[in-house]
Image (spheres, rainbow, N blue to C red):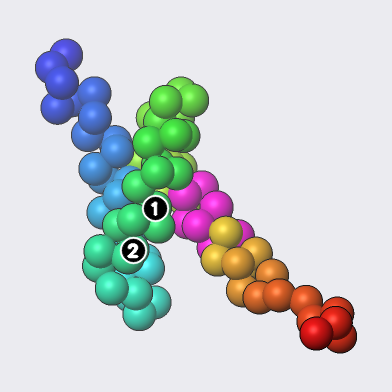
Amino acid sequence: MNFFDATAPIYQALEIAAGYFVASGDDPMVAHNRTMDHIVRLFNEGERRPLALANRAIGEAEREQLSRTAEPDGMYDGAA
C-alpha cells in the first residue's frame, strides 16, 4: 500500500463534506476549513470509511456552528 492509498479516504470524505457545505451556500475555502480538522481527527482515531468520515465531520461542524451562534456576545450587567 502506498501513501496515496492510505490517505484516499481523507480526500474522498473532504470532497463529500465540503461539497455539502458549498451546496448549503458556504465559500469553498470555508467549507474545507470547517471539515478538514474533523476528518483528520476521525481518521487518526481509526475511521477509514469516507462516507462515515464525511457524515461525522458534517455533524460535528454543524454542532460547532450552532454552539457559536447560540453563545451570547457578552452579558451586560448594568455596571458602567
Category of crowding for the residue at label 2, using alpha-carbon neighbours closer than 10 angstroms: few (below 14), some (14–19), many (at least 20): many
Q: Residue at x 16, y 14 (%)?
A: 1
Figure quadrant of the C terminus: bottom right
Depth check: give the residue in front, 64 or 13. 64
Q: Is residue 15 left or right of residue 57?
A: left
> Disc 1 on helix, strand or loop?
helix
Q: Residue at x 40, y 43 (%)?
A: 37
Name of the residue lying farthest toward the right: 78
Q: Amino acid at mark 2?
A: Ala
The reply to whether dot 2 and dot 1 touch (C-beta < 8 Å) is yes
Instruction: Name the residue that disc number 2 marks.
Output: 31
Indicate whether 8 appears above or below 18.
above
Instruction: Name the residue that disc number 1 marks.
Output: 35
The x, y position of residue 26, in whole percent, is: 34, 74
Classify residue 41 by image quadrant.
top left
Indicate whether 31 appears above or below 25.
above
State which region is magenta: 56-63
> Disc 2 on helix, strand or loop?
helix
